[in-house]
Amino acid sequence: MSAQTNTNAAASTAQTAIPNVILRLGDIAPNFTAETTQGPIDFHAWLGDSWGVLFSHPADYTPVCTTELGTTAKYKNQFDERNVKVIALSVDPLEKHHAWINDINETQHTTVNFPLIADPDRQIAFLYGMIHPNASENATVRSVFVIGPDKKIKLTINYPASTGRNFLEILRAIDSLQLTANYGVATPANWQHGDDVVIVPAVADADVPARFPKGATYLKPYLRITPQPNL
Ligand code: BEZ
């Protein structure tokens, strides 16, 4: 792997240790090249115009990770429907990834249908701040980065090694992000697909009728509810 660009932190080269970067919402997702189980990639070129989910695992041949990758494979069509490319990372070599995928397919009754990045030197893990030294000096935590078509980080999640992620929640959050990007609405607490949404404060009252033809309910001047616009 080589780290190519990181506009959010001090520049680094592939040959020197990369600082364990802290990435924030709105930052450009750093580009890199890497070997994956589906061939070499340049991350930004691989993303193209799609949304992306980059998520890390502590290690190959670990139980929770095995279930997570199997679950992601089963949800691949749901990511595709949302124009989201999914890619996993763990700090193990490519050959180990390939062998482990056989176990995932067998035990999770699926076929892993997305790439796994091999990051044995942990350079991408450091580039994305996936190593939390006070949790583990060597292994990545369970990080999730949702990246928009503009290559900016839209959402981050970090779970400890012992807690498997809820991939339905990741899909739900992507639905919210895409509603905001496309319609100027936000989603309230515990929102689920089909529920009403809220009109963002940046939309002036005068523009509400034209932008939200399904109607709006004003609970307060700042709390304006409208049906989910893309249904
Ligand atoms: C796992 O992936 O199953 C796991 C990894 C490290 C600690 C606990 C669980």
Image (spheres, rainbow, N blue to C red):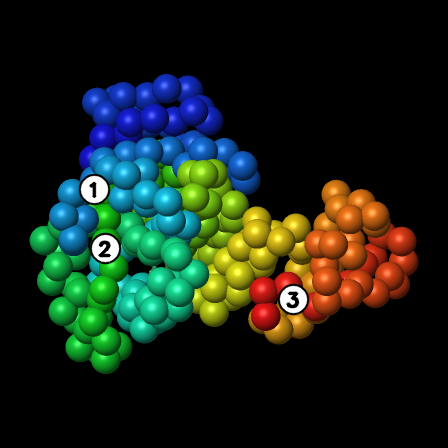
Residue type pointed to by label 1: Ile
> Mark 1 vs mark 3: which is more N-terminal?
1
Q: Quadrant of residue 14?
A: top left
Residue 178 is situated, as x and y percent measured from the top left of the image, at 54, 55
Give whichever of 210, 164 is nearer the camera.
210
Q: Is mark 1 within 8 Å of ligand 1?
A: no
Mark 3, secondary structure of its residue: loop
Q: Is residue 212 left or right of residue 194?
A: right
> Mark 3 vs mark 2: which is more N-terminal?
2
Give whichever of 179, 59 is nearer the camera.
179
Q: Quadrant of residue 176?
A: bottom right
Answer whether residue 166 is visible to the viewer in this image: no
Q: Are marks 1 and 3 in contact (CB under 8 Å)?
A: no
Answer whether residue 39 is visible to the viewer in this image: yes
What residue sits right under mark 3 in the picture? 228
Q: Are marks 2 and 1 in contact (CB under 8 Å)?
A: yes
Within 10 Å of the Cα at label 3, are there few (<14), some (14-19), or many (20+) other Cα atoms? some
Q: Are marks 3 and 2 in contact (CB under 8 Å)?
A: no
Residue type pointed to by label 2: Pro
What residue sits right under mark 1 in the picture? 41
Residue 168 is situated, as x and y percent measured from the top left of the image, at 47, 69
> What residue sits 42% from the left and 39% below the top?
151
Q: Nearer the viewer, mark 1 or mark 3?
A: 3
Within 10 Å of the Cα at label 2, are there few (<14), some (14-19), or many (20+) other Cα atoms? some
> What residue sits 28% from the left and 29% below the top?
3
> What residue sits 29% from the left and 27% below the top?
4
Residue 73 is situated, as x and y percent measured from the top left of the image, at 29, 68
What residue sits right under mark 2 in the picture? 115
Within 10 Å of the Cα at label 1, are there few (<14), some (14-19), or many (20+) other Cα atoms? some
Residue type pointed to by label 3: Gln
Q: Is residue 5 above or below residue 181?
A: above
| Quadrant of the drawing holding the N terminus | top left
